[in-house]
Image (tube, coloured by chain):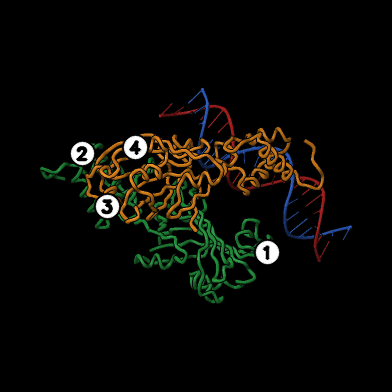
Chain colours: A green, B orange, C red, D blue
Amino acid sequence: MDWEPGLSIWKQIEKQLLADIAEGVFSPGDKMPTEMELVRRFGVNRHTVRRAMSALVDTNVVRVEQGRGAFVQEQILDYPLGSKTRFSQIVSGRHRLPDKRLISSEVLKASVTVAQFLDVKPGTRVIELFSVSEADGVPLAVATSYLPAARFDGIVEIFTETKSLTEALKRFGIDDYSRKTTRISAALPSSRVASLLKQVKNRPVISTESVDVDSAGVPIEYGVTAFSSDRVQLIVE
Amino acid sequence: MDWEPGLSIWKQIEKQLLADIAEGVFSPGDKMPTEMELVRRFGVNRHTVRRAMSALVDTNVVRVEQGRGAFVQEQILDYPLGSKTRFSQIVSGRHRLPDKRLISSEVLKASVTVAQFLDVKPGTRVIELFSVSEADGVPLAVATSYLPAARFDGIVEIFTETKSLTEALKRFGIDDYSRKTTRISAALPSSRVASLLKQVKNRPVISTESVDVDSAGVPIEYGVTAFSSDRVQLIVE
DNA sequence: TAGAATTTGTTCGTATGTATG
DNA sequence: CCATACATACGAACAAATTCT
């Protein structure tokens, strides 16, 4: 590589890497070359490469993980927390293709916690849905949802078919439902969740606990969701 | 320890540990005895102890960290995210003593990000406040706030004295301000933040970015806050 | 900063008591 | 009485994360 005079070398390297990313040489989520590889490619000192990378980190273009490498930052999805926000609407509103895959489902007896949120007696039969939400094939969140089994018998099949909880609920006469409360925390994912999110175990997730109610205010769904903190940001207006 | 017939051993151990915590033998934040110590104390197999601990984890009484031990869960503060929520009100409303300590302050030129949120030109002089918020002496959050220096000259002294941003702003004629937007993410804390929060580096924090505006809608403060995810939960209604 | 020691997490296997049909 | 299923309890070994030296 030959250097233009007048512009510092690290800025030229930054520009070149930015161009590589823009052209798709490195795609969002991809691992960037190691510092040593870049040293060889550009024929400069490691410090110079690091100066360029640091600029890319500051502008949020790449993210560096100690001991693992640098990665092209995925486009962070702003997820507004309103009473009527729907996953598929948010994602498709950003011109990305939403998908919600059911991983497993089960009918079981409500634990004390679940019963409390759904406002039913502990031991009542509930449907547990475990699903992954994706945008353009990239997993954004994994969710565990609980619905009263008596009211929503057969919802699993409809959910699998339509890939949308909103759609499935419509078949049960629920045209309108809304978010009652959301509790937000942060945690490290379990191995299972990390693997479904295709992320490392020690990158944190944003964890939410929420209750949806129908138009009469009756709880219809209680869910715990883990959002990849590298790919989603929650917004409260 | 002698076992009552009719109740499984692990449930009796759970009950005993719960009593210990209730009596203050182990206080919130304290480290519980190791599994091996409990094995010796109760004279049972490690699995049996683990079964009891797992029940306490499920009911959110203790929290277990691999390689470190089990800890009595601190009382988690619910922090509602409304447009007018104030830290001191929330904390004292829970009958805990709020305190906000200024760690450092500086006047510097606004970066592109800060300028954008405060709706000023990059390079405009802004005041940077770095503070720790505590309840009953336990740190809950560390915040970095930016305010336009021209409008709030001398606010540092008032803030130091009153320990409240709301109070300090009143002296500048701002009786009413409100939260415009809050962006929520999760991250691992820097060493500095972890140490100020008195928590380990690899427990995640809830990270928020927010803008406060005066009654005319003019931005007066932009802030980045890191909440200890073990001690605070954000609530959206 | 490299390795040992400590502590929790997971997965085998074995045995026993209890409820069900 | 027997077969089966399930929860409980113990034992051993190894994996993974953290802390100590």
Query: What residue is shown at x 17% (from left), y 42% (from top)?
Result: A9
Residue type, numbered disc 1: Thr
Distance from the alpha carbon under mark 2 to that under mark 4: 45 Å
Depth check: give the residue in front, A99 or B98: B98
- According to the picture, the residue beneath numbered tag 2 turns out to be A44
Which numbered marker is on residue B156? 4
- Residue under mark 2: which chain is it in? A
Residue type, numbered disc 4: Val
Q: Does dot 4 land on a helix, a strand or a loop?
A: helix
- According to the picture, the residue beneath numbered tag 3 turns out to be B119
Distance from the alpha carbon under mark 3 to that under mark 1: 53 Å
Depth check: give the residue in front, A185 or B175: B175
Q: Which of label 3 and label 2 is nearer to you?
A: 3
Q: Does dot 1 land on a helix, a strand or a loop?
A: loop
Crowd around label 3: few <14 · some 14–19 · many ≥20 (10 Å): some
Which numbered marker is on residue A30? none
